[in-house]
Image (cartoon, rainbow, N blue to C red):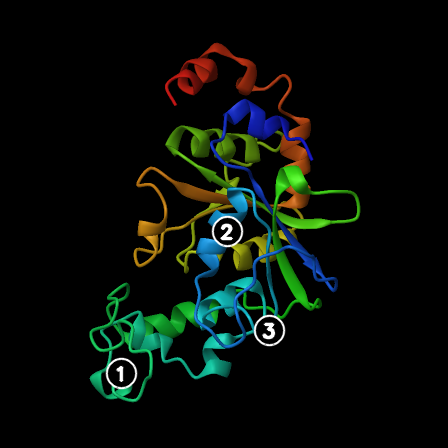
Amino acid sequence: MDSKLADALRLSSSPVAVILTDRKPGEALQFKEGRWGCVGSMLLVAAKGRAAVFDRTTFGCPGGGTGLGFGNQYERCGLAIDFLLANGSKEIADTMERRSHMEEGERFFKTPEMVRQVIASMPITDIPTEFVVFKPLDQVVEGDDPALVVFFVNADQLSALVVMSDYARGSGAGAIAPFGGACQSVLYGYAEAQRESPRGVIGFFDIAQRNRVDRETLSFTVPYTLFEEMETNVEGSFLEMEDWRELRERQ
């Protein structure tokens, strides 16, 4: 699938289609069952041209399973996420095979109580399909039916996407930037897809996973309906004007 947006932005990597399906694609990367892995890293793999697939036994980590829409995997896997994202717990760490940062905590929130409030407010969902597939947008074919599109962008490109997300609406609020794991903009993207006027989701703020991307890179996730709207409006927009052309040349 060609993209006017991708061409206008001069992206260095392909946008990634997030596809919900009951058909497992061939030649897609997949974590081994029960083994740890980062879903965010798989988004980056897909942006570089290789499809990835996940199911309810191969989502890499509880945050990844939750972010992909396989229900509340923090709860199901028994991960004390409230302590991990706050100031940790040595007692809990001593019981874990994979201690990670549990002993001292990642310190993204001041207290475990705050983390519990954040988790309670997340749009946790259980998708109706067996698989979630990440596929480079230029490899999407008829019948794939993407739910979301994820862009990896620099500050100039992000600015353009935020403007485009509201170009045909005039709401002044075309994007949100919630806290979450590196992959969890996918979860918020699902929630936005249920809105009458879906917004883009700025992400990859996870300090623990920022080392996986260039320091200038963030993600921008949109429901496919919003992607189609933005694609339609490239022609005639600021993306054809001199101000944008000047910015594009400095990339």
Q: Position of residue 131 (x, y in %)?
A: 66, 64
The label number, if any, that marks residue 43 in the structure image = 2
Q: Position of residue 102 (x, y in %)?
A: 27, 76
The mark that comes first in sequence, 3 or 2, is 2
Between marks 2 and 1, how big is the CA–CA gap?
Answer: 29 Å
Q: Which residue is mark 1?
A: 93
Answer with the quarter of the image where residue 187 lies.
bottom right
**Residue reaching furthest to the front:** 27
Q: Amino acid at mark 3?
A: Arg
> Relative to residue 98, is residue 104 drawn left or right?
left
Q: Position of residue 229 (x, y in %)?
A: 67, 34
190 up-or-down from 137: above or below: below
Q: Position of residue 77 (x, y in %)?
A: 47, 81
Between marks 3 and 2, how big is the CA–CA gap?
Answer: 17 Å
Q: Quadrant of the N terminus?
A: top right
> Relative to residue 24, is residue 177 drawn left or right?
left
The mark that comes first in sequence, 2 or 1, is 2
Between marks 3 and 1, how big is the CA–CA gap?
Answer: 25 Å
Q: Which residue is mark 3?
A: 56
Specify few, some or many for label 1: CA neighbours under 10 Å numbering under 14, 14-19, or 20 or more: many
Q: Amino acid at mark 2?
A: Leu
Q: How many marks?
A: 3
Residue at the spot 69% in from the left edge and 57% down from the top edge: 26
**Residue 210 can be seen, yes or no:** yes
